[in-house]
Image (cartoon, rainbow, N blue to C red):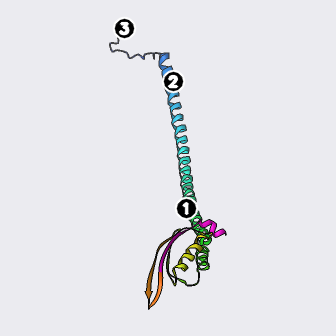
């Protein structure tokens, strides 16, 4: 007897070979994925290293800024100190000028004259005084003209006056001092 099987038989299909381009594409994709993962890891590690270097350099910049600030403060203090030193030196140099001025004025003062007021403004000197005779005033003016440290002597006023029944001459003089540096060295 013949048996006929009407039921379909399931046959196993032979697997079709995977096309070569699919294999190569899969292999290339896997390799590219591995390379990309390596690059991500590599650049992340470099980025972290650069961030660390940046932090270290920022710290160093902050330290250097502090040092620069300290140097600038030192320079300001040093400049202030130098200014004060120069002022002190100038004062020390000019300290003897009033003494020499008064000494010269008193040396040139003849008998019969006394000074009432003297004002000094820079190199300009104004003197108000009294004398017993007008010739004494003229003598004083001539003495000042012959002085080494006075210039531009000008008798502004000389007039007769009476103080407590004594006849006197009131006078006003203006003159200038020569160069202050020459006075201090002579």
11 falls in the magenta region: no
- Mark 3 is surrounded, within 10 Å at the Cα level, by few (under 14), some (14 to 19) or many (20 or more) other residues, namely few
Residue that numbered label 2 is attached to: 28
Which one is nearer the viewer's eye here, 9 or 174?
Answer: 174
Task: Name the residue at 34% across, 14% down.
Answer: 8
Point out the frontmost of discs 3 and 1.
Answer: 1
Residue that numbered label 3 is attached to: 2
Residue 120 visible somewhere in the drawing = no
Dividing the image into 4 quarters, which one contains the N terminus? top left
Dividing the image into 4 quarters, which one contains the C terminus? bottom right
173 falls in the magenta region: yes
In the depicted structure, whether residue 3 falls above or below residue 44: above
- Mark 1 is surrounded, within 10 Å at the Cα level, by few (under 14), some (14 to 19) or many (20 or more) other residues, namely few
Point out the frontmost of discs 3 and 2.
Answer: 2
Find the distance from the CA under tag 3 to the CA under tag 1.
122 Å
Magenta stretch, residue numbers = 170-186
Which one is nearer the viewer's eye here, 11 or 158?
Answer: 158
Point out the frontmost of discs 2 and 1.
Answer: 1
Residue 136 image label: none
Q: Earlier in the sequence, mark 2 or mark 1?
A: 2
- Count of picture labels: 3
Residue 2 visible somewhere in the drawing = yes
In the depicted structure, whether residue 54 falls above or below residue 185: above
Which one is nearer the viewer's eye here, 163 or 93?
Answer: 163
Residue that numbered label 1 is attached to: 76
Picture coordinates of residue 77, whole percent (x, y): 56, 64
Picture coordinates of residue 183, whole percent (x, y): 62, 69
Secondary element type, mark 2: helix
Q: Earlier in the sequence, mark 3 or mark 1?
A: 3
Task: Name the residue at 62% across, 79% down.
Answer: 107
């Amino acid at each position: 007897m013949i048996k006929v099987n009407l039921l379909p038989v399931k046959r196993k299909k032979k697997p079709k070979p995977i096309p070569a381009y699919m294999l190569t594409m899969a292999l290339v994709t896997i390799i590219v994925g591995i390379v990309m993962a390596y690059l991500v890891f590599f650049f992340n590690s470099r980025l972290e290293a650069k961030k660390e270097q940046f932090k270290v350099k920022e710290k160093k910049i902050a330290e250097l800024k502090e040092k620069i600030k300290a140097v600038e403060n030192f320079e300001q203090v040093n400049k202030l100190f130098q200014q004060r030193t120069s002022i002190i030196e100038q004062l020390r140099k000019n300290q003897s000028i009033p003494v020499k001025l008064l000494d010269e004025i008193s040396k040139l003062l003849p008998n019969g004259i006394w000074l009432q007021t003297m004002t000094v403004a820079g190199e300009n000197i104004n003197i108000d005084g009294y004398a017993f005779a007008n010739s004494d005033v003229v003598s004083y003016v001539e003495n000042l003209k012959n002085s080494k440290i006075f210039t531009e002597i000008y008798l502004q006023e000389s007039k007769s006056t009476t103080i407590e029944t004594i006849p006197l001459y009131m006078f006003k003089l203006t003159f200038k001092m020569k160069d202050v540096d020459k006075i201090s060295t002579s």
